[in-house]
Image (spheres, grey):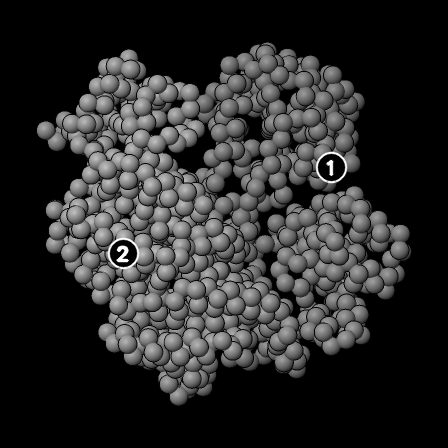
Amino acid sequence: MTPSTTVHSPLRLYGRSGELAILETLLGKLRTGDGGALVLTAPPGLGRTALLRQAAAHYLRGHGGPVLYASAAPTEQRLPYSGLHALLCSAPGPLPLAPDTVLSSGITPGALLGLLRALGAEQPLLVCVDDAHLWDPDSRAALGFAARRLGAGSRVAVVIGAADETAFAGLPALRLGPLDDDAATALLDRLTDGAADVDPVVRSELLREAAGNPRLLAGLAGRLTPGQLAGRTALPYPLPGGESVLDAHAAHLDGLSCDTHTLLLLAAAAEEHEPDGAGSDAALLLRAGARAGLSASHLDRVLFAPAGSAGALQRAGSRVHFSHPLLRRAVLHRAPPGRRRAVHELLAGLLGGEPDRARLPALVQKACASTGPDAGLAEQLERAATAPRPHGERSAALARAAALSTDDALRAARFTAAAEQARLAGDTGRARAMLARVGPHLAEGAAPYVRGMLALRDGPAADAREALLAAAELLAPHDPRRTLDALFGAAEAAWAMGDAIAYLDAMNRVPVAAADRPTAQYRAGMCAVLAGHPDRGHALLRCCLDSAARAEDAGELLRAGACALVLGEVDAACRAGARALAVVRTRGPEALLPHALEQLAYAELRSGQHARARAHALEGLHAARRTGQRNSATHLHAVLALAASVEGPAEACAAHADAALTGAGPHGLAQAAMLATWAVARADLAAGRPGEAAARLGPLVRPGPGTGHFATRMLAVPCYVEAVVLSGRAHEAGGELAVAVQEFTLWTTRTTDPQVPAQLARCRALLAPAEEAAARYEEALAHHDRAGGDFERARTRLLQGQLLRRLRRTREARGPLRDALVAFERCSARAWAGRAAGELRAAGEAVDAPDRSGPGPLAALTPQQQRIARCVAEGATNREVAVRLSVSPRTVDHHLRNVFAALGVRSRTELARLLDRGGGARLQDRDEKKRADL
């Protein structure tokens, strides 16, 4: 099979449902006799022509009305009225005005408007013009004039496709953007007939290179052989197949002067030694332009005024960027090879005369000027691509070195090194692109290592673990540093999966002889803890944590933070995390930034600093998205869900938890899934839904495989105990509850987390008889006084006040409840503060009601009646309301009758509608479910 036979033109449009809907609206109006106009604008290759054809075909199929359709012929651009001549020639029948008359004598804009209206009077008319920006000026002006005056009742619709809306100002315009990832992936599947053997790295590189341009994607995929698509053969560098799209972009610049073309070529060439998206140095362009003989006035006009380059160049401070990435590539593609080499040699000469810091850029420019493989220049590039040059620059230089290499093994090694530097720079797309150039039979340990590290942050955790274990075996004989990194990466993947046995397996493979003392202590300590020897393990981890006081390496500091979290020394974990973050920000690598922020945010959550954790997690989420690390983004969503379960709002908690669970499932991230579920359950507790919280937490706290994460499930036990007791299910969950508390009691002896003793005393208070519970709460509060932390102490005071109110000691209950309310407000725990305020009002103390109760229908009710009314409006039964509010069902029934009388309603559904909380629909669903069960 030849390469061309593996690719087919798409049968339908992908990712354009919104644009098609807008066109359908226009055509729908046309069918009813109303006209209108729309300008579709887009750079070449984004599907402007396909949309026009789809609109014309859809109108013909659905209505059968006449369609005038014309595409521009660039060679006729200087022939007056040639565009309108072509449009009128497409008419299905004779016209009142012969097209040849228009070509010979012209037509006024008013006459064209009258002609279109006359045609529309017979039958609704659709006019489609593609590439109208390439029409002759007279045709463009007349069409624009007519289109602006075709409105309601005109029975004519005009759809114009153009590069931009400049020539058709005043008309409604719709600018097409690149396809999103899902649409581009679906298109690629269609282009390759949905072949299951398309290599994921090759797929990623095609999508990255096409950047959402469907025609470019089709061109790139169409030039690859089946072996290249399947990853059995290395991809060419650069990828072929984009010539037609690049030519179309370059045509936009054909009218510019020769000097402007020279400057554009200099700007395009000057970006070759820069990281992707960095643009070029304006000062270098000024020097290069002067050396090329361009006048200072011309340089100023083109570089510093957008109109000077027809909008091709844009200046941002000292950097110059092309308005579209493909435009830069088009300029290089269109330039004759000899001229392009001359420009690169000019830039190499300018950069070569600067200090050593410009040596690498000068070598890259020399490489671009090379006419073929050059082993000597490749070696110079490889030697220069070292610290302190940024990782992105090193990656670009190593890729050039690989392209110049004459030896296959050296080429593969240099592409692999380029991939690793791109990964460290946080450019996962480029890293995968470099890996796609490494032949599978030439890949030694380094390529599987880079693949595994990429998967660790952006792929299935199980795949990352296997890849890194395989890489460690290949690297062990000759690269001890990467061997250690691979094994620690495999252990991290197993941790994220929640597989303690796999974690121990990876850690036990770490060669002790290759590790320094802190690393060996970390390995031995973690293995001892998970093997059931906590005393020995904690001693080793504490030594590792102490050693980190002098550490300057980000990896060592992150391991120290992990040690502190396992020990329960949350303050030390925060300090280590803050130092690790500072090191990453000042020294890199960029790839570690999301992970450093994630670990610091999690440590701050554990220490009760929820606002600070949220700020760091949000920054980490942005960094994870920027660097293409979906696994890190998933963990950070879980951290944000936990923070929102304290601070609120509930909608933010639900959104972050949903994002975390969506990402955790496909990639097997058990820890992120557990934290997200815990967050939702804690939000349920804050909202007074203990039954739902208990149902979520039950599976997480049970021992054994397939349940909660081995390292974090104990953290959720206090919430589980509270949820079970408050929902009135303590008797039903007796055995399971006892096991959870017993495990938590044992864990309390093995952690130094200052909050855990107070949480254990609170659990015991919840489970104790009423006469014993008071003493248990006092014990918990004593622990809180030593540990600090507003939020956990406020939760204990809230439960203590609830108990006193349930025992009808309402006057005594007000003190704890008031303390809880103030503490929740102090730490911005809004939902929890609302729960405490409701309890305090029920205890007879006046508290400012939330805004939702304002002067609405509940204003005439007592605080307790208001709470019952809201619960019922949400769909709760009398028994569920009683559990939430710590009263008897009979009390609920009594208050509810009074609520109905006071509000003049006769049913729960009417109450829900009155409060406008959507409760009516939920009640109806609940009633239907009950009837179905019966």
The extreme front residue here reads 811
Secondary structure under tag 2 reads helix
Which of these two is toward me, 119 or 400? Answer: 400
The image quadrant of residue 673 is bottom left
Which of these two is toward me, 518 or 333? Answer: 518
Which residue type carries mark 2? Glu
Q: Residue at x 31, y 67 (%)?
A: 751
Q: Where residue 630 appears, x then y in whole percent?
A: 44, 56
Q: Are marks 2 and 1 in contact (CB under 8 Å)?
A: no
The Cα–Cα distance between marks 2 and 1, rounded to whole angstroms, is 91 Å
User: Where is mark 2, residue-wise?
Assistant: 779
In the image, is residue 239 above or below residue 766?
Answer: below
Which residue type carries mark 1? Glu
Q: Residue at x 31, y 23 (%)?
A: 862
Which of these two is toward me, 704 or 801? Answer: 801
Q: Is residue 372 visible?
A: yes
Mark seen at residue 640: none
Image quadrant holding the C terminus, namely top left
The image quadrant of residue 812 is top left
In the image, is residue 270 above or below residue 545?
Answer: above
Q: Where residue 434 appears, x then y in whole percent?
A: 52, 67
User: Where is mark 1, residue-wise?
Assistant: 76
